[in-house]
Amino acid sequence: MLHPTVYWGVQPARPVQASTAGDVPAGDIVDVAVGAGSFDTLVQAVQAAGLVDTLKGDGPFTVFAPTDEAFAKIPEDQLEALLADKEALTAVLTYHVVPGKVMAADVVNLDSAETVQGGSIAIDTTDGVKVDGAKVVKTDIAASNGVIHVIDRVIMPN
């Protein structure tokens, strides 16, 4: 059961400290998400789905990451059921991941992107940037194996 006071996105993601090389982020996608402090539910879901090693892999990956607040928009019983169904959870999580490193400057030139799950997310840039209707609220959070863009709700594959 999720603690009722855990909400994604209450605090903005903390900046990631670069390594001494100056141009390489301090961690991979998972490390950056853990360090941000606003992706606890996402990290819990990645662990439950057994995707930690994948998202710590070479990549590169682009992750459209829902905040804790975004996950809090899902009714608690539905979220608990999703977290308990590894197959469905894996499908939802991999739907948030696009192969390759797609920076914000690249996203604005796209109208869709193929996901690791196999589906396609719609990208709308008419009023800000939205992926499958979820608003992108923070972009270009660098990781050693890709990039994270923060979204305000969980997107679901068809």
Image (cartoon, rainbow, N blue to C red):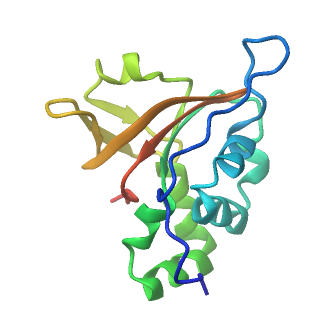
Q: Quadrant of residue 127?
A: top left
Of residue 66 and residue 122, the one placed in the foreground of this image is 66
Q: Quadrant of the N terminus?
A: bottom right
Locate residue 131, reporting x and y percent.
31, 42
Identify the residue at image location x=46%, y=84%: 76
Locate residue 145, reporting x and y percent.
70, 28
Of residue 90 and residue 131, the one placed in the foreground of this image is 131
Locate residue 31, reporting x and y percent.
75, 44
Identify the residue at image location x=83%, y=11%: 21
Of residue 21 and residue 84, the one placed in the foreground of this image is 21
Identify the residue at image location x=40%, y=59%: 154
Q: Quadrant of the C terminus?
A: bottom left
Q: Is residue 35 above or below residue 88?
A: above
Locate residue 54, reporting x and y percent.
73, 45
Residue extending furthest toward the left: 126
Asked if residue 31 lies left or right of residue 116, the reply is right
Q: Is residue 45 above or below residue 99?
A: below
Numbered label tally: 0
Asked if residue 123 lies left or right of residue 116, the reply is left
Q: Quadrant of residue 136?
A: top left
